[in-house]
């Protein structure tokens, strides 16, 4: 397997999927097992629907990621890439985080509900309350996954942006999708904080409606708390990674210049398409 495929496609995809299945999904499975007698009674059917839905959503996520990363892979493999190929790769790379974030929402809330939760209800295995709870939990999973998938996809493309000169692309903003740092931080905070709160509210209303004691769901509450802590750590790391790299390189370069040892042929690596990458790009343009 080529190193570029591992760097830009395989490793980021595995990271996203492993975190989703190991950190986010266990709480959903627990609440369905604990709250739905029909799910426990027909557990084999439930596992079959879950495996079927997981296979479909996994293939969709795989296709979307490869579709938007492929222009980057093609460009990296070229010995002397042309300007048009670079523009196409940058445009595709700018759309990739948005596409992957939107796809994970559709995967879990749309396809997950349609292929796993709804058939169980239509066969009479679960009640309407179970159906609503299952849809609510999948909605919270989808919202929780959106910011993580966006940040993981964006960070996986840092080596690409740092490798190629983006003059004539970033300064023209032609066909490039961007999300400002302020918007990114705000959306990340909201998508970390709101889903756990939504889960708690949904479970409390489910308990009031069905008469189930919340005490029986205590383990699930701890799973949600642990999931939230892990995602806060991971999203914070991904959010600050490009920022810390750019600040580190800028600080080192300015320090050398202030000491009279600056090498004016050096350039700052552009870590992305937001304000941080723009700072490095325009600094390089100023030095030139």
Image (cartoon, grey):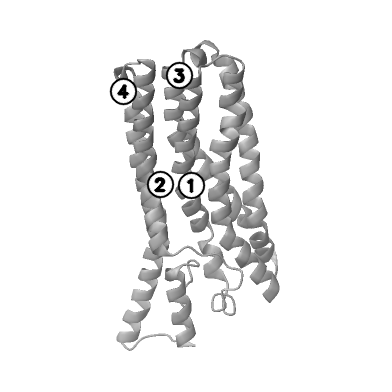
- The alpha-carbon separation of the residues under discs 4 and 3 comes to 13 Å
* Relative height, residue 164 to residue 259 (above, below): above
- Residue identified by numbered label 4: 218
Is tag 2's residue or tag 4's residue first in the polypeptide sequence? 2
* 88 to the left or right of 50: right
- The alpha-carbon separation of the residues under discs 2 and 3 comes to 25 Å
Which residue is rendered at x = 51% and y = 24% of the image? Answer: 131
Q: Nearer the viewer, mark 2 or mark 4?
A: 2
- Judging from the image, what secondary structure is the residue with disc 3 in? helix
- Residue identified by numbered label 1: 146
Which residue is rendered at x = 50% and y = 52% of the image? Answer: 150
- Judging from the image, what secondary structure is the residue with disc 2 in? helix
Which residue is rendered at x = 38% and y = 62% of the image? Answer: 182
In the figure, residue 3 lies in which quadrant?
Answer: bottom right
- Residue identified by numbered label 2: 191
- The alpha-carbon separation of the residues under discs 2 and 1 comes to 8 Å
- The alpha-carbon separation of the residues under discs 2 and 4 comes to 23 Å
Q: How many marks?
A: 4
- Residue identified by numbered label 3: 33
- The alpha-carbon separation of the residues under discs 4 and 1 comes to 26 Å
Is tag 2's residue or tag 3's residue first in the polypeptide sequence? 3
């Amino acid at each position: 397997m080529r190193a570029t495929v591992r760097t830009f496609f395989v490793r980021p995809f595995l990271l996203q999927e492993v975190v989703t299945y190991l950190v986010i999904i266990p709480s959903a499975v627990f609440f369905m097992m604990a709250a739905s007698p029909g799910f426990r009674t027909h557990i084999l059917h439930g596992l079959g629907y879950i495996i079927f839905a997981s296979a479909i959503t996994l293939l969709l996520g795989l296709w979307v990621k490869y579709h938007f990363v492929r222009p980057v892979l093609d460009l990296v493999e070229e010995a002397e890439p042309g300007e048009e190929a670079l523009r196409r790769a940058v445009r595709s790379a700018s759309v990739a985080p948005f596409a992957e974030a939107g796809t994970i929402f559709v995967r879990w809330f749309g396809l997950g509900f349609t292929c796993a939760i709804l058939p169980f209800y239509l066969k009479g295995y679960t009640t309407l309350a179970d159906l609503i709870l299952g849809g609510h939990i999948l909605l919270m999973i989808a919202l929780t996954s959106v910011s993580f998938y966006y940040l993981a996809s964006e960070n996986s493309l840092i080596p690409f942006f740092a490798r190629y000169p983006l003059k004539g692309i970033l300064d023209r903003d032609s066909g490039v999708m961007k999300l400002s740092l302020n918007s990114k931080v705000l959306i990340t905070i909201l998508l970390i904080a709101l889903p756990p709160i939504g889960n708690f509210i949904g479970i409390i209303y489910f308990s009031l409606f069905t008469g189930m004691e919340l005490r029986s769901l205590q383990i699930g509450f701890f799973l949600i708390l642990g999931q939230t802590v892990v995602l806060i750590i991971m999203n914070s790391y991904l959010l600050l990674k490009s920022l810390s790299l750019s600040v580190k390189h800028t600080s080192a370069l300015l320090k050398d210049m202030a000491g009279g040892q600056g090498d004016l042929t050096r350039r700052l690596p552009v870590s992305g398409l937001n304000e941080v990458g723009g700072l490095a790009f325009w600094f390089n343009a100023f030095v030139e």
